[in-house]
Amino acid sequence: GDSVTQMEGPVTLSEEAFLTINCTYTATGYPSLFWYVQYPGEGLQLLLKATKADDKGSNKGFEATYRKETTSFHLEKGSVQVSDSAVYFCALRAAGTASKLTFGTGTRLQVTL
Amino acid sequence: NAGVMQNPRHLVRRRGQEARLRCSPMKGHSHVYWYRQLPEEGLKFMVYLQKENIIDESGMPKERFSAEFPKEGPSILRIQQVVRGDSAAYFCASSPVSDDEQYFGPGTRLTVT
């Protein structure tokens, strides 16, 4: 079945450091790919998405590129801020299905001054 | 436009009791999804409903769990005879059409004592 694998957390970075959170997936066809962010005590918010190979999703300085050849959708940000501290989830929606999202286990990011 | 509303935010039940979790989708959204997040894990899909119809319940446990989305009123996730293993955060999401972005509520944290 479909699955998403994320790098283990927590990830601790100093403010202004470069961020990479790895995400790889297993799915048939061409799924849509997403990054969601969850702040403490809140629900998930969509951060960015890509719906076909080589698409780059970007938002709030974060970006991720849909790589079909490596089945990856790594999240990057050039300079993190303390306010970016949260849990980040990679997810996919299988091609041809109009419903469920399959999530990775999440990666906790802690940014310090 | 209010976001997805869930209540209660926190629910404590003793083993054997029933838990009812409510979800009011965003205005204009007729598609509702329920996900469960166990401690230190990602979200797992449970069920996808449209008004008065269950579209996909492939993630629902076979027993004790049921969901509905009536013509009027919120969607309800019902867990009968709760056990300690049901302790989790339950998130609801809604979308205006089936293949559009899912907007998440803040979740209901169920604790079974």
Image (cartoon, coloured by chain):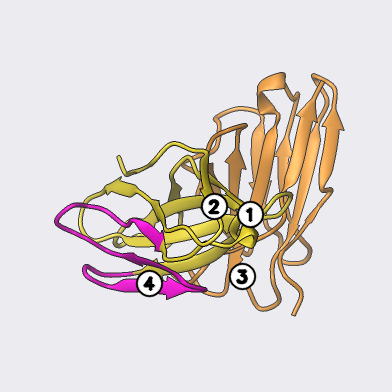
Chain colours: A yellow, B orange
- How much space separates mark 2 and mark 3, taking CA atoms? 43 Å
Query: What is the chain identity of the residue bearing mark 4?
Result: A
Which-is-in-front pick, marks 1 and 3?
1
Label 1 amino acid?
Leu
Chain letter of mark 2 equals A
Q: Is residue B81 placed above or below B104 in the rendered structure?
A: above
Residue at mark 2 shares a chain with residue at mark 1: yes
Q: Earlier in the sequence, mark 2 or mark 1?
A: 2
Mark 3 — residue?
B30
Residue at the left extreme of this rendering: A69
| Crowd band around label 3 with a 10 angstrom C-alpha radius: few (<14), some (14–19), many (20+) | some
Between marks 2 and 4, how big is the CA–CA gap?
Answer: 24 Å
Q: Residue at x 60, y 39 (%)?
A: B37
Q: What residue would you read off at disc 1?
A: A113
Indicate which label's residue lies in the foreground, 2 or 3.
2
Q: Mark 2 near mark 1, Cβ–Cβ under 8 Å?
A: yes
Task: Kindly tell me whether residue B80 is visible in this rendering.
Answer: yes
**Picture coordinates of residue B42, whole percent (x, y):** 52, 41
Tell me which numbered mark, 2 or 4, is placed earlier along the sequence. 2
Q: Amino acid at mark 4?
A: Gly
- Which of the two residues, A40 or B30, is positioned nearer the viewer here? A40
Q: Give the extent of the magenta segment.
A: A51-76
In the figure, B9 relative to A75: above or below? above
Q: Residues within 10 Å of mark 2 (few under 14, many from 20)?
A: some
Task: Mark 2 vs mark 4: give the one in front.
Answer: 2
Residue B73 colored magenta? Answer: no
Q: Mark 4 = which residue? A: A57
Which element type, helix, strand or loop, lies under badge 3? Answer: loop
